[in-house]
Amino acid sequence: MSSKSTQCLLSRTLIEQVEQLFLRAKSLNHRLLFYVAHTALGKGFVSSLLEKFCSQMCIAVVYRDVTDESTSLLLDEVKKSKVNFRELQFKDVNTLLGTTWDSLIADLTNHMSPNDIGVVVELVKGGGLVLLVGPSPEELESWKSLYHSFFVAPPFDIGQVSKRFEKRLLKKTIGRTGVVYVDANLNMAIGPAWPEPQKLEQQKVEGKIFPREIYEMCKTNDQRKTLFALENLLNKNVSMVIKADRGRGKSAVLGLALAALLKSAPWQKYLVTAPERSSVQTLFEFLQKALEALGVNFRVTKSEDSVVSLELENSVVYYRSPFVALRERADLIVVDEAAGVSLPILIGIMKRFERAVYSTTMHGYEGAGRGFSVLFLNRLKKQRTNVLEIEMKEPVRYASNDPVESWLYDVLVLDAEQPSLTRLEIKPIETLYSALNRDELFEKDELLRDLIGLYITTHYRNKPDDLAILGNSPNHEVRTLFSQEGKVIAAAHVCTEGDLSDSQLKLLEKKDLKGQLIPSMILRYYPHLKALGKLKGLRIVRIAVHAQLHNRGFGSHLLSKIEEEFKRFDWLGSSFGANHRLLSFWFKNGYYPILIGARRNPVSGEFSTVVLKPISIASQKLCVELSKEFRLRFLESLYDSYFDMDSELAWMLLSKTYGEVDVKPEFKGSQRLRLESFLKDLVIYEGASDAIRALVKAHFIASEQKRVKIEKDYERLLILKSLQGRSWEAVHRILGLTLGVKTINDLRSLYKSLIQKMCEAYLK
């Protein structure tokens, strides 16, 4: 496009204003944000802007699908500008993690996903342009995109999807510092100028151990200081914690440090773990660059285009998922994005590895940084004498006070914190139960931040998309407990499920219906009990209590209030990763296990579990069968899928039963005769194990009231030996001290006495 036509689209005054913004952004190493209404496309504005100000840049252009009308118009303009660009779809944005771009153009018209916005915006370096294309404020009410179908759950339709998240985004965008809004008529609203960043002089840091070449690869003072602190790893029993917001270069400095350690330390195995394999690619990238700078030869192993290990002649750096990492042995473990790893796994890592580095994002979509600080870091300090904390504040890609980072954190509520409480003596009965008005919630910034802060402090995994689901989905709501001072101290994110028609149930048989988690899982595992999907239910998606008020009854009080409000529903339920603490909480509040996932979550190591509290008579009848079916499947799978499950967790799942079910052992062939021979000492356990297993299974299939009374730890013995098939040595190692048995022969005798007691009760 000629300079003359550019002048026609942008008045001289506006050209000068935009040019001043670009020059200021570049001089301050900040980024500039343009939000362009999609109805402005095809009029030459984007091509003019790119041609005049971005001709020398490498630009990422991201969209949902090339066939979208807005994307087609956008690409036409980008191509006319003759800039250097690369096209990518949002479904592939994770491949961009760790990369840096001069500028970004993203078409949000059909895909305004908070998760993806959070990823792509942070790819742009200082002095660059972030250009977003999307709906204008005037068309939000009538605007429907394919992305909105994500929020639809039967019996609702797309017309009932709200636009609370989008309204809030535009409200936070137009007129903001460092932001230019362009409407359909190419009118520009330019936000006020932004302040200069704090200038930091480069500090010279010389390590005592790590090579000088490694220090020279650091970009910020914080990186150099962190690298220097990481030299302490060569001391024995050091646990280090690196805390930073996103984009501070912590993964990069970990890669540099590992290269220095490979050169300096006499170790052989360096284990790296993170919630996702993609999370450690930046670490491996800088590890490779540092080794090349040191002239060290190495061999890289990849899986699905991701680096999983790097080998030297006598040492290796390798990745394992968090749960698998628990079984590994290494001289050093590095836990990147530790806030995204569940607390039980982190505690297991702490106990297993004496030398460890925990790196965590404090504010961002990678995990709950405050939860990491509140729940894990305090525990680490109590159990480890040598804990070194480091905080990194300087951004790497751009200078501090970047207006686009400020915008992103504000829009996605990435820097939310749980509310500060002035009074901790409060009792549950003194709180105010409230059904939050979501329109009001998304208009009141402080209230939304308190709510999100509560969630991200309590839960180990949170995503920006949760914000859009909470705001837009017609079947989602929020229930809270307020203190007398008006602070949110407990909150539950709930959604309605079930109430499906016959035709919707048939659709559910073919694929999962969005927003129908519990009915779809019941249909998948227990097809003959799919009638639960016809009953109206409420799923508690997430429940959180202020960290300073844990274990004081606030969560239970909130559940009781929810149950009272929704007493005309058929059932209440929830789904979560099973651990002792959570199961105890839900069981105490009258919920029963009805389903457990087939595989462990690779991050938390937990099995997803569904619990149900029946309310109506119809749901009570179904729950009797669901509870029994759960035990049948679980018992038959303990020998296989759940072979290594903690026996106390297995016992908890089997001990909470609904309804009354009486079961007699079913013996086949000579099983009963061999069981009698075992009791008479004519055959050993191994000769009658199949018959004993049939007896033990009948004991646990029966409901709690119908079982012969056996102490908890004795039942754990039955689970470990007969249901999980553990060796006598393994069982003795796990339960020997608890049961007070000194030898394996003593354990065998105790086991036999239990079987004798069960036979007397069940074989009358």
Image (tube, rainbow, N blue to C red):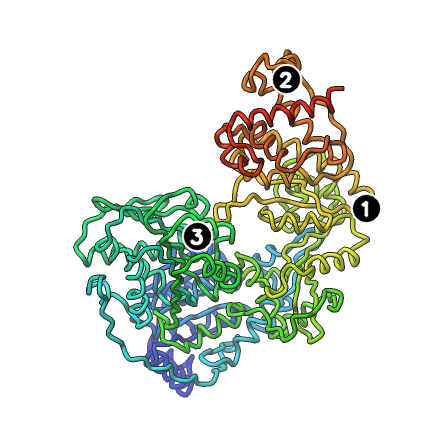
Q: CA distance from mark 2 to mark 3?
A: 45 Å
Query: Which residue is drawn at the image coordinates 39% and 72% (left, top)?
Result: 393
Residue 587 falls left or right of residue 278: right
Q: Amino acid at mark 1?
A: Ser
Q: Earlier in the sequence, mark 2 or mark 3?
A: 3
Q: Dot 3: within a 10 Å radius of its alpha carbon, few (fewer than 14), some, or many (20 or more) residues?
A: many
Q: Amino acid at mark 2?
A: Leu
- 656 to 192, vertically: above or below: above
Q: CA distance from mark 3 to mark 1?
A: 46 Å
Q: Earlier in the sequence, mark 3 or mark 1?
A: 3
- 758 to 351, vertically: above or below: above
Q: Which mark is residue 616?
A: 1
Question: Looking at the image, can residue 48 be seen?
Answer: yes
Q: Amino acid at mark 3?
A: Met
Quadrant housing the C terminus: top right
Q: Earlier in the sequence, mark 1 or mark 2?
A: 1
Query: Which residue is drawn at the image coordinates 54% and 69% (left, top)?
Result: 413
Q: Viewer-proximal residue, 718 or 263?
A: 718
Q: Where is residue 297 drawn, in percent x and y?
A: 19, 49
- 181 to 597, vertically: above or below: below
Q: Quadrant of residue 148?
A: bottom right
Residue 226 falls left or right of residue 43: left
Quadrant housing the N terminus: bottom left
- 626 to 602, vertically: above or below: above
Return the residue at label 3.
350
Between disc 2 and disc 3, the foreground one is 2
Return the residue at label 2.
679
Between disc 1 and disc 2, the foreground one is 2
Q: Which mark is residue 654?
A: none
Q: CA distance from mark 1 to mark 2?
A: 46 Å
Q: Viewer-proximal residue, 735 or 576?
A: 735
